[in-house]
Image (cartoon, rainbow, N blue to C red):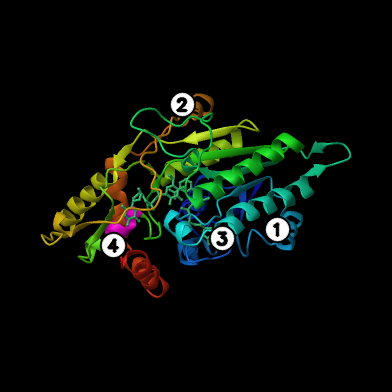
Amino acid sequence: MITYLVTGCAGFIGTTFVHFMLSRYTDIKIVNLDALTYAGNLENLKDIEDDERHIFVHGNICDKELVAGLMARYDPDFIINFAAESHVDRSISGPEIFVTTNVMGTVNLLQQAKNAWYDAGQKTWKPGKKYVQVSTDEVYGALGPEGFFTETTPLDPHSPYSASKASADHFVKAFHDTYGMPVNITRCSNNYGMYQFPEKLIPLMINNTKNHKPLPVYGDGMQIRDWLFVEDHCRAIDLVTSAGRPGEVYNIGGHNERTNIFIVKTIIQQMSEKLHDPEINESLIRHVEDRLGHDRRYGIDPSKIRADLGWYPETAFEDGIVKTIDWYLANETWMERVTSGEYQQYYERMYKNR
Ligand code: NAD
Ligand code: DAU
């Protein structure tokens, strides 16, 4: 029996990770710690609420007593930290919570893990334990038209979000370098798929096209992101957790670089065809004021994880985007629930004067 303490699993990627792990393994226990912020949604986990292998704990990764208690009670083999404030636009309008959750929360998890796993007298760690930090390609900054991010690319974050994630990565490395803590850091490119909150590009555009609302494209729309289907990311995290060499960083990405405008036009075309709706067309596109400090291009070199762990992406973008759109069309009630209430105020705040 392997026990995982996994944080942030009521959010987009964490939800997929829990489903992925429970469908793949029988003899595991997942303790899922999530604060249920605006981005966390327990409804995502409704189908597994009676599954004894999954234990949901409502709480904050910054809470020292709570995390210490979970370490004592469940004695996890692995900690995987997905919990974060994850949206760049929100970090630009309010950076403080990004420091609290992404930096202080990570340090608390590291510290509680060290308290539980480290014998300071002997300078030894309990065997078989590891901490995995789910980080992002954004810590590397932005690329010009050529080249890719490798694990040795210097960190050069630009947004408050990426600065907080880079800071957390430094702490994870510091716990490894100082105390010898067994850790891995993963740095993945943009994920897409089911359960993503519609403040992010792809679900926002799906929701707006469906409702014939303007499609807000920041600046010229020629920024490039490297898109990966979320299940491929989850498979990579599982591999890194079980087989990654302690102390190593692994980049995760599938060489699937697309401009934002290409993504938006693809969604328009797919949605118009699927809904047989001629009103869904490119006249919905609105070029709006650019994001401050907007990174122009991200592109991951995934050679290391392929060579060391045999990982490669299984879902082509052309298939993944269709699966994703189909999921949102089949789960209209989910979309309606998450876009009611606070979402309306968020949308107004972000897009009104743009
Ligand atoms: P998300 O915003 O959808 O979900 C974040 C989850 O963390 C939510 O369930 C939220 O309730 C929870 N959370 C937030 N603050 C918390 C706290 N203080 N204590 C406990 N739980 C808290 O995020 P996501 O897109 O699923 O991203 C998950 C992780 O993956 C993040 O660390 C992010 O930086 C990283 N990442 C995301 C992407 C992407 O494209 N979405 C790509 C690479 C890396
Ligand atoms: O690269 C990994 C990162 O990808 C993760 O670390 C982040 O958690 C995740 O949110 C994502 O960050 P991005 O900023 O790239 O994702 P977002 O969906 O917010 O935006 C994708 C691109 O689309 C970006 O260039 C901004 C642009 N955009 C976004 C929105 C929401 C628009 O043009 N219009 C929009 O309305």
- The label on residue 67 is 1
| Residue depth check, mark 4 versus mark 3: number of the one nearer the observer | 3
Residue type at mark 4: give it. Answer: Asn
* Label 2 sits on residue: 303
For residue 295: magenta?
no
Task: Give the main secondary structure of the magenta stretch.
Answer: helix
Judge whether residue 54 can be spotted in this image.
no
| Whether label 1 touches label 3, CB < 8 Å | no
Task: From this view, report whether residue 49 is shown above or below residue 31.
Answer: below
Q: Secondary structure at mark 3?
A: helix
**Could you give the CA–CA distance between mark 2 and mark 1, rounded to whole angstroms?**
35 Å
Structural crowding at the residue carrying mark 1, measured as other residues with C-alpha within 10 Å and reported as few (<14), some (14–19) or many (≥20): many
Q: Which residue is mark 3?
A: 96
Residue identifier under label 4: 207
Label located before the other in sequence (2 or 1): 1
Q: Which residues are magenta?
A: 201-206
| Residue at the right extreme, as displayed | 121
